[in-house]
Amino acid sequence: MSSSTAPTPSCRCHRINRPFILSGALDDPLWKQASTLELYDIHGKPGRFRTQVRLLYDATFLYVGFACEDTYVWGTITERNGPIYEQECVEVFLNPANARHQYYEINVSPLNTVFDACIVSGRTPQNPQTPFYAFPSFDLIKLHTAVKVSGELNRPGAAKGWRAELAIPFAELPGAEHTPPKPGDVWRANFYRIDQPDRCEPEHYAWSRTDLVNFHLPWRFGSIEFV
């Protein structure tokens, strides 16, 4: 099987003039300045539930916000770097150096459990199933996250969705040309969501389509221009 050959998307990330305290609700007025991205299924088609991503940055952090529609929001894993990607979560993949074989993965669950790792991969478009190596001992010490569930957690049909906010520290992401990024700098990135409406069959959403149930395809990352 091969990955998508569709064009990869691009967006702008706007700088803000003050930091803000994360609430998980995406209700700070600064979010109105954010670029808003839509996530679709792995083939680029609308999924069962809508998922949006918002991006901002300042001198210290890249801010990422997720808004996820859902009627059954659930999770059980509370240990950092536990396998939340086997349940429901949102995921940020960042490649500050635009290097094909190394990037960073930051995931957050509805319980506000974090998985973060440095990924080293030998995968190519011709060999998308080549093993990759995750180093979960790589922890973002100054990472901040917040989650807000609309409705009741872990009860079928009792929710309307959930939101997550991440403040990802630039200083802990080696490889970028400038820290923090300067206007005009471009990073490669992708944004994902794993949803399991029935706790059984997962549904996968992505900003840049993959055409495979496989998020670790760095050549499919889109482009973020800092402005």
Image (tube, helix red, strand yellow):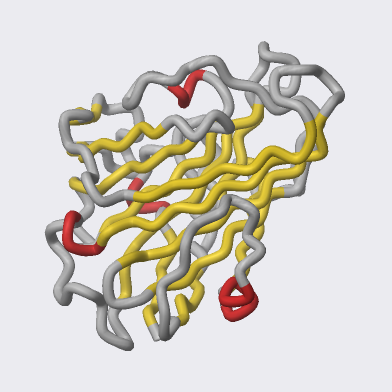
- 109 to the left or right of 215: right
Dividing the picture into quarters, in which one does residue 63 lie?
A: bottom left
Q: Please, which residue is most extreme toward the top here?
A: 200
Residue 15 can be seen, yes or no:
no
Query: Which residue is drawn at the image coordinates 58% and 32% (left, top)?
Result: 110
Residue 178 falls left or right of residue 223: left
Name the image quarter holding residue 117. top left
The number of callouts visible is 0
In the image, 211 versus 50, the foreground residue is 50
Q: Is residue 125 visible?
A: yes
Q: Position of residue 22 (x, y in %)?
A: 50, 57
Residue 40 in the image: state x and y as whole percent.
67, 49
133 is higher (above) or lower (below) than 168 = above
Query: In the displayed structure, does residue 65 sit left or right of residue 121?
Result: right
Q: Nearer the viewer, residue 43 or 160?
A: 160
At x 32%, y 88%, the residue is 183
Q: Where in the figure is residue 90, as x and y percent of width and height?
A: 53, 40
Residue at point 47% right, 62% down? 21
Residue 137 relative to residue 16: left or right: left
The image shows residue 180, relative to residue 98, as above or below, that is: below
Q: Quadrant of residue 41?
A: top right
Residue 175's spot in the image, x, y percent?
13, 61
As drawn, the residue found furthest toward the right would be: 157
Out of 39 and 171, give the one closest to the viewer: 171
Q: In the picture, which quadrant includes the C terminus?
A: bottom left
